[in-house]
Image (cartoon, helix red, strand yellow):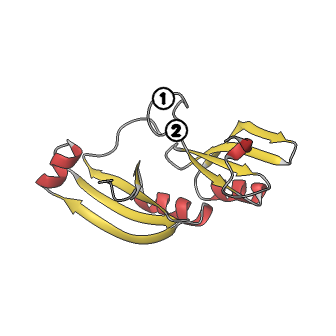
Amino acid sequence: MSVQRYTHVGICVSDLDRSLHFYRDALGFEELGRLDMQGKPLDQLNQLEGVKVRTAFLVRDGSRLELIQFVSPGWVGPRAARPMNQLGLTHLAFRVTDFDAVCAKIEAAGGGLIRDTRMEHAGPMRVIMATDPDGLRVELLEQPGSLDAVPGGGR
């Protein structure tokens, strides 16, 4: 196959430093490096004019995130959770062992909890949707069993 590997997911953020604090301190990502970029090739790639970005690459469990702050021309859109049925990225998901502690870390790091999504099931299993500081949904799931199992027991 000519596609060698999956590399990362890019997330547009309004404040790089605040988002770094959230993803490192609340969700346990490790920072790999930062880049500041601008110029015509970046304008062409992003299909925008006058692009100037600050980026940081993070890693957790072998997956990478690229946090991108558009210094110029700035970011657009609401800083609120998108509807789950809106096309595109819906959420990032994490298995947790101390549900309440992770929920507290989310709020302490500038994120929020969508409290009416909280569910508890036999097994025991607890789940809630939270948001990062810019409204990207983050699913937290506490469930016994293999970390490689499909959440909720699906195939």
Q: Residues within 10 Å of mark 1 (few under 14, many from 20)?
A: few
Tell me where residue 142 appears, x and y as whole percent: 75, 52
Tell me where residue 87 appears, x and y as whole percent: 45, 30
Q: CA distance from mark 2 to mark 1?
A: 7 Å
Provide the secondary structure element on which disc 2 rests: loop
Query: Would residue 3 be found to the left or right of residue 82 on screen?
Result: left
Per the rendering, the mark at residue 86 is: 1
Query: Would residue 76 be found to the left or right of residue 124 on screen?
Result: left
- Name the kind of residue labelled 1 in the image: Gln
Q: Residue at x 69, y 58 (%)?
A: 147
Q: Residue at x 48, y 29 (%)?
A: 86
Q: Residue at x 14, y 54 (%)?
A: 41
Query: Would residue 50 be found to the left or right of residue 29 on screen?
Result: left
- As drawn, the residue found furthest toward the right would be 122
Query: Would residue 51 be found to the left or right of residue 89 on screen?
Result: left
The residue under label 2 is 90
Q: Are marks 2 and 1 in contact (CB under 8 Å)?
A: yes
The mark tally for this picture is 2
Evaluate whether residue 140 shows in this view. Answer: yes
Q: Residue at x 23, y 46 (%)?
A: 46
The image quadrant where one finds the C terminus is top right
Quadrant in the picture for residue 104: bottom right
Provide the secondary structure element on which disc 1 rests: loop
Give the answer, above or below, for where 104 lies relative to 126: below
Quadrant in the picture for residue 100: bottom right
Evaluate whether residue 50 shows in this view. Answer: no
Tell me where residue 108 appears, x and y as whole percent: 64, 58
- As drawn, the residue found furthest toward the front would be 1
- Name the kind of residue labelled 2 in the image: Thr
Give the answer, above or below, for where 46 lies relative to 83: below
Per the rendering, the mark at residue 107 is: none
